[in-house]
Amino acid sequence: MNTEPSPYVVERMSRKDVPVVAEMEKLIFTLPWSARAFEYELQYNAMAHFVVVRRRASVDPENRAKHGLGWGHEAPSRQPILGYAGLWLIVDEGHICTIAVHPDWRRRHLGELLLVSLIERSCALNASVATLEVRASNLAAQELYRKYGFVVVGLRKGYYSDNHEDALIMTTEPVCTAVYQSRFQELKTAMFESLSEQLTVSAC
Ligand SMILES: CC(C)(COP(=O)(O)OP(=O)(O)OC[C@H]1O[C@@H](n2cnc3c(N)ncnc32)[C@H](O)[C@@H]1OP(=O)(O)O)[C@@H](O)C(=O)NCCC(=O)NCCS
């Protein structure tokens, strides 16, 4: 478990989170998943790994160094959900099926925090690579993925049913290798520095 300080926690998504997640989904995506789709993933898909990010309930300086990017180890908090993400383990690939941050909370490294947690999870599940589909027009998301070593490996023509937009298929190199991990740990350290600066600002 990571122990860097952060004003946010990443926790497993629970069924109690689904109504809020489904509302955010409608706000953010033009083809939103239904609450039922999330329920199904949480209840019946053993290969699905979904998380939410919240502001940490307690960010007092004495305790915060003890906490970090947990995977099911954080005490559940009642803070509002700021973003969420999901991964399917498909054979030996960690397929990132969704990632979203509430519009009011963007550009604070929360999308990155979610992506880092899914890449770490992929590695823990012995996935070889992480992969995903992204709209050709979604440059913000593509930048995030590029930062973490995703490259375009293919195209699904007219993949999205609302506007027939193409999907880019983006994939990493193997995520558990020393080469990937070396760069990943550097990026993660920089991300936690930025997150802990937010902690300092909010403490002032
Ligand atoms: C994509 C998304 C999850 C990014 O979340 P975020 O919390 O705003 O992004 P972060 O602050 O973590 O940004 C991390 C990196 O991503 C890239 N990035 C994020 N938003 C960007 C933007 N608007 N323009 C350019 N680069 C961007 C940058 O490389 C950034 O690193 P930097 O701050 O060092 O420049 C968010 O924009 C979102 O929820 N979009 C709507 C849902 C969506 O499109 N999901 C992806 C579906 S494939």
Image (cartoon, rainbow, N blue to C red):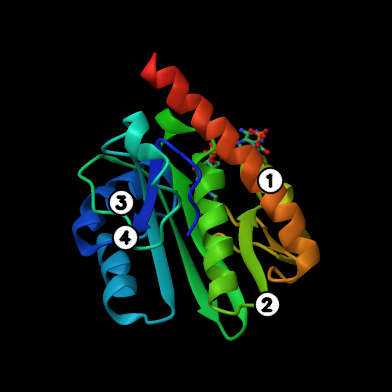
The disc labelled 3 sits on which kind of residue? Val
Q: Badge 4 is on which residue?
A: 13
Which amino acid type is marked by label 4? Met
Residue at 39%, 20% in the rendered image = 202
Q: Nearer the viewer, mark 1 or mark 2?
A: 1
Please tell me in which quadrant of the rendered image residue 131 appears.
bottom right
Q: Earlier in the sequence, mark 2 or mark 3?
A: 3
Q: Position of residue 107 (x, y in %)?
A: 55, 31
Residue 171 % position (x, y): 71, 65
Query: Looking at the image, is 166 positioned above or below residue 59?
Result: below
Could you tell which of marks 3 and 4 lies nearer the N-terminus? 4
**Residue 179 percent coordinates (x, y):** 81, 63
Q: Is residue 100 above or below residue 12?
A: above
Q: Which residue is mark 1?
A: 187
- Residue positioned 27% across, 36% down in the render: 58
Q: Earlier in the sequence, mark 1 or mark 2?
A: 2
Q: Which residue is mark 2?
A: 128
Q: Which quadrant of the structure image shows residue 140?
A: top right
